[in-house]
Amino acid sequence: MSKIDVQPVIMAGGSGTRLWPLSRAGYPKQFLILSGNSSLFQQAADRLATLGAEDITVAAPLVVGNEEHRFMVLDQLREQRLTPGAVLLEPVGRNTAPAITLAALQALQAGSDPVLVVTPADQTVTDPDAFTTALQDAIRQASEGAIVILGITPDRPETGYGYIRSQAEGTGLRVEAFVEKPDAATAQRYLDEGAYYWNSGMFVLRASTWLKALQRFRPDIETATRAAFDARATDGAFVRPAKDGFAQVPSESIDYAVMERCPGSEFPLRMVPLDAGWNDLGAWEAVWQVAPKDDAGNASRGDAIITDSRNTLVHATSRLVSAVGLDNIVVVETPDAVLVADRSKSQDVKKIVNQLTASQRGEQNLHRKVHRPWGWYDSIDMGERFQVKRIMVKPGASLSLQMHHHRAEHWIVVSGTAEVVNGEKTILLTENQSTYIPLGQVHRLSNPGKVQLEIIEVQSGSYLGEDDIVRYQDTYGRN
């Protein structure tokens, strides 16, 4: 029996603006734990790892994301004991058609023509066995040259999703057309007719088939993306297409570039139904739908107390949040921002993000706790001319060798061991010991131990912004 080579592809470049304030540009929803005990990205990677069968061989996943999130990808895969085949870093966002093109070109480097299983990184599935069965069916069809899309069996007249209209053909289903998001009456008709499915955004096809279809329908995207890929740089697991070249690639989705043009063309477009408890968690309404609820339909995560309320979601991250007398409301608390919204308006949270962006407010991009490749820092207090941070450094990790023009720093070790470069001196500090870094002094903080290092940093000076860093050496290639 000949084996079908499968290349999983995880699209991890989204920003998740409708799930603000938990999801932010610097730490978007795919890396958050919103359902279950692992992040949406980790769940996607775990599901794809189960696709192997007697006739199917599954490679390590390719991840397509952006430069800012590259270490989150590696860290979260490492937690699942998974190693990526490569992490393709988009220098600028160009939507999903160029992203899958990068993955197809990378997949072909190994010399075979694998079946790509392309999935977004921000979905949930409650029936993994049904998911695996449906994907294996799609893989076998795609290995024979078909382009296969996973269609979600609808269980309600949903107006927030695009639909696929299907037609029976042989023992399977042929895609007749893609349909835009309907109004409520039309969505009910789709549900009643039974020939319509939600568009999951999951596609299965050979790498060469995608490139041929793209060359047929959007040769401009294929040519520009290939040129940027051919000029790529490689750094360990990271593959970086040429920035200037990729910036010239037209921005377009998979659907608009290829899929919606396939019906009636030389490219057979088929659909496999998926009934596996799927949800794309695109907004807080969807998070409420998949969450466990009490008898009144209330759902909560974190330290929350809900009373005399119905169909309400409370998500608390850093303190007690209590709700009384609410009906169909979403409350999301983070250390630096709180959202209160009608559940039916949860899609409109992106309007808040747009206002934050227009006002150049930091709450759109970063949390108070900011993750870095070496660990994280949490800005726990600040005022005029001072800032206090709690800093965690991973075992064996190190911050850059750096200097500040406008601030001095005091470091106090809370736990673990710190190796400190302070000017010409290198010293070791342990719990309750401290040091002072004068303004303008070259310095570095490292963790030489096998347990996490935590320190309290007190900054003082005329300017305390993160851009007041002059880096001389950096393990992670940052400027």
Image: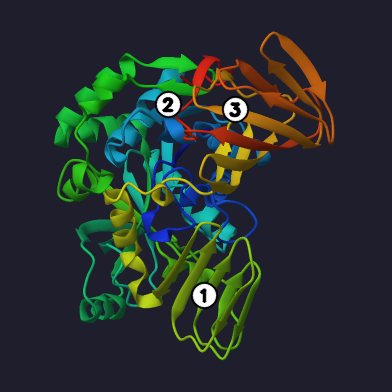
Which amino acid does the dot numbered 1 rest on? Leu
Q: Depth-wise, is mark 3 or mark 2 nearer the camera?
A: 3
Residue at the disc numbered 2: 107
Residue 93 in picture, x, y percent from top left: 31, 36
Which numbered marker is on residue 408? Answer: 3
Q: Quadrant of the N terminus?
A: top right
Residue 328 in picture, x, y percent from top left: 44, 82
Q: Depth-wise, is mark 2 or mark 1 nearer the camera?
A: 1
Judge left or right: residue 451 versus residue 400. Answer: right
Which amino acid does the dot numbered 2 rest on? Ala
> Which residue is at the front of the view, 191 or 342?
342
Which amino acid does the dot numbered 3 rest on? Ala
Residue at the disc numbered 1: 313
Quarter holding residue 473:
top right
Residue 171 vertical position relative to residue 70 in the rendered view, above or below: below
What is the secondary structure assignment of the residue under circle 3? strand
Residue 401 in picture, x, y percent from top left: 59, 17
